[in-house]
Image (cartoon, rainbow, N blue to C red):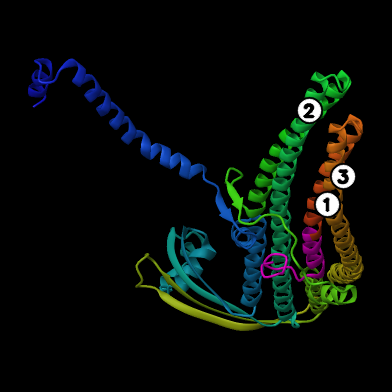
Amino acid sequence: MKRRLFHYFSRGGLSLELRRPFFRAIRLGILGLLSFPVCAVSQQATEPLPLSLQHAVTVALEKNPARKMALADTRVASADVREAQSVLMPHLNFSETATRGDDPVYVFGSKLRQQRFSTADFALNQLNTPLPFGNFSTRFAGTWNLFDSFASWHGMSRARQMNEAAAHQLERADQEIVFRVVDAYYGVLLASKQLDVAEQATKTAQSIMDRSQVRFDSGLVVESDLLTAKVRKASRQQELIRARNNLDLARAQLSTAMGVSVDSVFQPAEALAEHALPLPVLQEMEKEALANRPDLKRLLSQEAAQQQSVAMAKSSFGPRVNAFAGWEMDNPTFVAGGGGNNWLGGVELQFDIFEGGAKQAELSRQRALADRVGAMKQAATDAIRLEVRRAYYDVDASRQQLEVARAAIAQAQESLRINQDRYDGGLTTITDLLGAEEAARRSQTDYWEAVYRFHTSYANLELASGTLNPQSPVVTP
């Protein structure tokens, strides 16, 4: 088939003029088919994924390594509870031992256990210099702590309290992760607005430079006005470059807070804007903090656990009662048969009369640790009160600053417009115009920073009060 097509085209089946566009079309079609999937995949790979704040929080609570560490701590605490409970249960073990030797006592006892001792074994030469003898011993042994002055019960209670402390620590870790995601998410929104402001400022600086160029060409201003305008444009271009890099860095910080790769590309589903949030009351926030803060609950659980440690140290002075039992089978070979078996059981009472003062020292140590945990709880309570007040005043200040910044934007824009008209009319200097331009840019920057601070400070207040969660108003405005 290939040869027929070749002869057809080479012998004039198609003229030279017709063959060239024909082959060209075929080549372009093949290249298009090959490149289309690649282009589609590359565009799909670089297409930013829309991301809402609530979705970002959900992803972070699943993938953030800090939460995984806190979750692992809870599993460790749960395992400690099961370990403490196991002390209350009887313990049973199995052993299989193979021995061989000519030790007179060993040979004598092994023959007795195998129930193969005979009258001939009483001969002195058999007793003093027996032949090597082998024994396979199969043992089942059990022990049970019947009473240890309630030390095991105190240990189990201590493990449960520490398990509750780990759960409170996990809850606090979740709140801190939510706050970091909120802060990073609003950081991306702020960086986007700052980039918009930088682009608009660059355009304004370009417009001012063009106006100065026209007036300089007309001989209405000196060259210093034009140079000043050019310097301002260069400054705005530098700020634009910095704003672009800040946006990339903010996105990387958001990815890190979410626990995903920093190369992940996300596009916030909303823009930075004001949202109505409930007005907090200081006294209510303090009450909620003292009642809801998981880290304070964790200290309370640790304090209760330490009291159990003190009780355990006291229990060590009391008696202990243990039960034990065992069953043993001894055979001359590994296969059961031809041997004997025996059992043994009993109850043991233990009481330490003198141990050199170690128990007194341990009791003093546990009491000192209990005092330390109590002091830590008091210090944490005072710190939480102060943290709530600081966060409350930050919210109040940012709310008032937001109102001032909102009013300043329109005033600065109007001032810039007036100065531009006056500069075109030769009624003002380039310095006044650039000052108005700087004020307009600064007013927009201050406004968006105030919006960012208001939302993040509100999230910080909820974090300080222990109420921040994925359903908080700042997360789902």
Q: Amino acid at mark 2?
A: Met
* Residue that carries the numbered disc 2 in the rendered image: 209
In-image side of 224 versus 57 (left or right): right
Q: Amino acid at mark 1?
A: Ala
Q: Which residues are magenta?
A: 455-477
* Residue that carries the numbered disc 3 in the rendered image: 415
Residue 341, compared with residue 264, is above or below; it is below
Q: Position of residue 462 (x, y in %)?
A: 78, 67
> Residue drawn 39% across and 73% down?
339
> Residue drawn 70% across and 37% down?
245
Q: Position of residue 234 (x, y in %)?
A: 78, 27
Does residue 475 belong to the magenta stretch? yes
Q: Position of residue 283 (x, y in %)?
A: 90, 76
> Residue drawn 91% across and 35% down?
432
Q: Amino acid at mark 3?
A: Ser
Q: Nearer the viewer, residue 321 or 428?
A: 428
Q: What is the quadrant of the C terminus in the image?
A: bottom right
- CA–CA distance between discs 3 and 1? 9 Å
Residue 260 visible: no
Dot label at residue 410: 1
Q: Nearer the viewer, residue 25 or 270?
A: 25
Quadrant of the rendered image containing residue 421: top right
Which secondary structure lies at badge 3?
Answer: helix
Classed neighbour count for the residue bearing mark 2: other residues with Cα under 10 Å, few (<14), some (14–19), many (≥20): many
Quadrant of the rendered image containing residue 233: top right
State which tag comes first along the sequence, 3 or 2. Answer: 2
In-image side of 91 versus 455 (left or right): left
> Residue drawn 37% across and 65% down?
334
